[in-house]
Amino acid sequence: MAPRLSVVIPFRDEAPSLAVLHAELAAVLDALPFGAEMIFVDDESRDDGAAIVARLAAGDPRVRLLALTPHAGQSAALEAGFRAARGELVATMDADLQNDPADLPALLAGLAEADCVCGVRVARRDALGTRLASRAANAIRRRVLGDGIEDIGCSLRVMRRSGLERIKLFRGGHRFLPVLLALEGARVAERPVRHRPRRHGRSKYGVLMRLRVVWADLLGVAWLARRVARYEVKELSRRA
């Protein structure tokens, strides 16, 4: 029987976190009243993360492993997971354990009134420089796009797959996923979620690199938002 929920988890060099994440997520999925699957997408890791997930899949039929070649980035990894997802609902989360799987049920409940429910990280556990850069980037994005989304950088989200099928993620587009969905008519809502300190490794994105790349992408999304044509179609005549 096809699962109703697909949880897409991109990873690159996150081997120490994967078994812990699987155990936490499995406990949450066990308590749901419907079936679910976990789609781990390896963005050409240089550690043994893929082997760890393969072992997890051998013991848990809900686990699926996709592998990208060559390294293509988080947006490509997410899109690969979206295309492989079998559930009508799709969730995303990071593999570094900073997202708490226990927040998923509350986000799923929010889909009763929305098509995409995004987490808003409270009491963030990142370095001060990262928090300040994120706050500035969110403020600039809201000013330019007028989208009203408080924390677009939170990877913990749940969405309807039908909306995801209508968008194409460009490189870096994962940072604007709720905006891209809204441009296709999706109703976007936010819910507070927990944020945990990183236990292993370091962030893949430096502050300066993040701001430079995001600024260029923001201008592209702003152009796209202004070019979207919104209209309704009614068929006035139809042959029997």
Image (cartoon, rainbow, N blue to C red):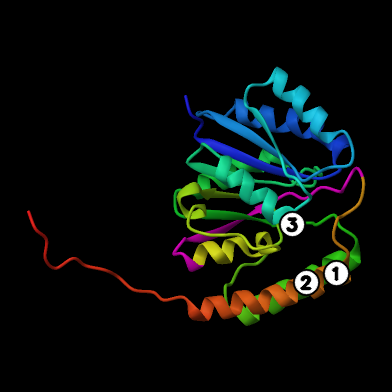
Mark 3 neighbour density, 10 Å: few (under 14) some (14–19) many (20 or more):
few
Mark 2 neighbour density, 10 Å: few (under 14) some (14–19) many (20 or more):
few
Looking at the rendered structure, the secondary structure element under dot 2 is helix
* Mark 3 or 1, nearer chain start: 3
Read off the residue under disc 3: 122
Expressed as whole percent of the image width and height from the top left, the position of residue 176 reads 64, 65
Look at the image and tell me whether residue 203 can be seen: yes
> Marks 1 and 2: CB-CB under 8 Å?
yes
Q: CA distance from mark 1 to mark 2?
A: 6 Å
Read off the residue under disc 1: 209
Question: Measuring 56% from the left and 40% from the top, which residue is drawn there?
Answer: 85
Q: Going by the image, does 151 lie left or right of 46?
A: left
Viewer-nearest residue: 168 or 70? 70
Question: Measuring 11% from the left and 61% from the top, which residue is drawn there?
Answer: 238
Start and end of the magenta stretch? 183-200
Question: Measuring 61% from the left and 74% from the top, which residue is drawn there?
Answer: 221
Image vertical order of residue 205 relative to residue 94, above or below: below
